[in-house]
Image (spheres, rainbow, N blue to C red):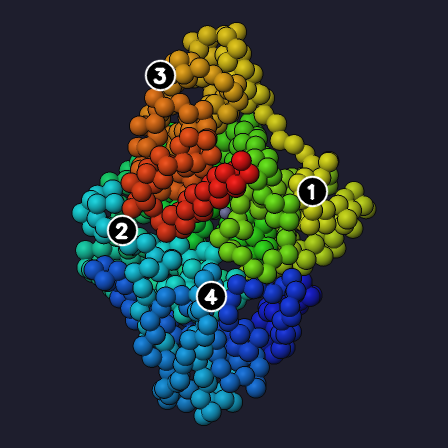
Amino acid sequence: MHCKITVLIIALLSAFACTQSEAPKPREQGDLARDYFTFANAEHFVTDHLILDLYVDFEAEQLRGTAKLNMRRVDEHATEIVLDTRDLTIESASFFSSAGRSIGADFRFGEHDKIMGTPLIVDVPRTIQADPEIALIITYRTSPNSTALQWLPAELTAGGEHPFLFSQSQAIHARSWIPLQDTPAIRITYQATISTPPELLAVMSANNDPDAERDGTYEFDMPQRIPSYLLALAVGNIYFAPIGEQTGVYSEPELLEASAFEFADTQAMLETAEAMFGPYQWGRYDLLILPPSFPYGGMENPRLSFLTPSLLAGDRSLVGVVAHELAHSWSGNLVTNATWRDGWLNEGWTSYLEMRLMEVIYGKERAAEENVLGYRELLLDFESVNPVMQALAPSLETGDPDDFQGTIHYHKGNLFLQYLENAIGRKAFDVFISKYFTDFAFGTITSEAFLDYLDENLLSVHGGTVTRAKAEQWLYKPGLPDDAVIPTSARLDEAAAMATAWSVGEVDLEDVPVSDWSPQGIVHFINSLDAGLTTEKLGKLDQALGLSTSRNAEICRTWFIQVAERQYRPAYAALEQYLRRYGRTRLVKPVYEALAKNGSDLQLAQRMFAGARGNYHPLTVASIETVFERALESASELRDES
Ligand SMILES: [Zn+2]
């Protein structure tokens, strides 16, 4: 990395990024570059390398073993190391001196915080106080309640015979399966030895071997530096099928063929992405298809994106999520947001790159359709998200980072970058993109550092076409600037016009050209139906288009939100089945929300949730519980007023 970019790397890690001798600046209150969601004293010690040796105990729902942290001292006076943990049992801590001696260490927990977990404080023995590099070895075990780990019994898997484990470390959950410095500001390499029941396979965000012998002991190496939220592990009855030279899918055997079909374009996507954004820096790119309780559409774990099986629509219509996770190989994994308040640098950039990839592989109209649907979700979010949080880069010192990642970071970030591209011109903007990923490769960046970089390398070069003040408006003000470029799609406009015409009886259902539309067109059609449609009309629609039984999870999602909002009770049984079938938060949470808010079905929604929650990930459960808490609060406020 070239030193001229030093000033642009966040203050916390400037020494790390450029030379290893400078001391980082101390962190101050109100410092936008500070990560408020870690206890780690990274101004004293920085981890460079992690070595895990873990046994996977499905019966106890527990990982146990050791984490060895190779750390570098950056403050010669520091006498203790503070690590992030959550619900970990620590059995021992010891240091390994540069002279090769093992030295036991005293340790204690600090004060527990509901969101951040519990700091683990380890005293550095006097005898190694002068060592510039030290190795800290912690023997520990996880709790069955680890917020990162989901232990699925066999009956919740596709095959039904073997249990399954998967991790979700983003945003601050790595600390619930590994004691470490859990901040995106620090990048580490890692190695791991994972021991499992011999019939199962372990895979990680590392160098998975498609031909690995299934013997219950698996070795991993991740030679590229990654932030802690990209540490990932899955164990189950997992098999591999190749897609292309560098790409393939891992899944339970029952889903392998469907997955290989659905994601067959992955190799082409990878090659397209390289041509557009610069070299892919991670070796292989594989996909892991998880059981339905995976809480997200996808998680960009490097070399191995984790994906929800709800993408298996049978027609490759939902592969935008793969384009998204792949694009994270540049925005997020290669160039990482310094703190979670800068999440738009990961998600906004990735949504923009996703759209560019979709455009090349599936055509402009398909990309435009997804763009319009994203814009619609953003407008809905603006109605409910408070103005402070509508800024791309709000000033945040408290709260739960899991709640920062609404669609604001994704869709508003995407629109900001589209705005820049539109104003400056695609050719010049593409040059900027490549330079950005080169200059910050394997680095970490704040919104403020990005703004300076943007100003210097794009805005000032193009003579005030876009002012710095305009860019600041995008970053720090709510809503959208007046001159934002609003996405449009001729095909979706047609679907919306048809929805209105059918709603008011101007056309018959048989004359609505649904078979010519993409699933996105059908989604838009459903969203554009008039309010106040009769039960009879909704029934005809459901029957004609097979909405309640659609294999496409996005069509079902849109339909069942409407079913709940309109209280279309004939479809409630199908709605409940849908809520049990999927665990992805995006798919189920808005349906519960619509039921909870429709004025009659809050209790019904709670009963449905009680029946389905066993299929959900703890993150999904928590977010749905929040929906009910808010609904109950507003119900009691209404009672108080009347
Ligand atoms: Zn993403």
In percent of width and height, residue 184 lies at 52, 62
Q: Looking at the picture, does residue 189 appear above or below residue 522?
A: below
Name the front one of labels 4 and 3. Answer: 4
Q: Secondary structure at mark 4?
A: loop
First-in-chain label (1 vs 2) = 2
- The amino acid type found where label 1 is placed reads Leu
First-in-chain label (1 vs 4) = 4
Residue to which mark 4 is pinned: 113
- The amino acid type found where label 3 is placed reads Gln
Name the front one of labels 3 and 1. Answer: 3
Classify mark 1: residues with Cα within 10 Å, few (<14), some (14-19) or many (20+). Answer: some
Name the front one of labels 1 and 2. Answer: 2
Residue to which mark 1 is pinned: 420
Contact (CB < 8 A) between labels 2 and 3? no
Classify mark 2: residues with Cα within 10 Å, few (<14), some (14-19) or many (20+). Answer: many
Query: Residue placed at 51% from the left, 50% from the top?
Result: 403
Disc ID at residue 543: 3
In percent of width and height, residue 237 lies at 23, 50
Disc ID at residue 152: 2
Query: Residue placed at 40% from the left, 32% from the top?
Result: 601
Looking at the image, the residue that sits furthest to the bottom is 127
Contact (CB < 8 A) between labels 1 and 4? no
Q: What distance separates the C-alpha of mark 2 from that of mark 3? A: 35 Å
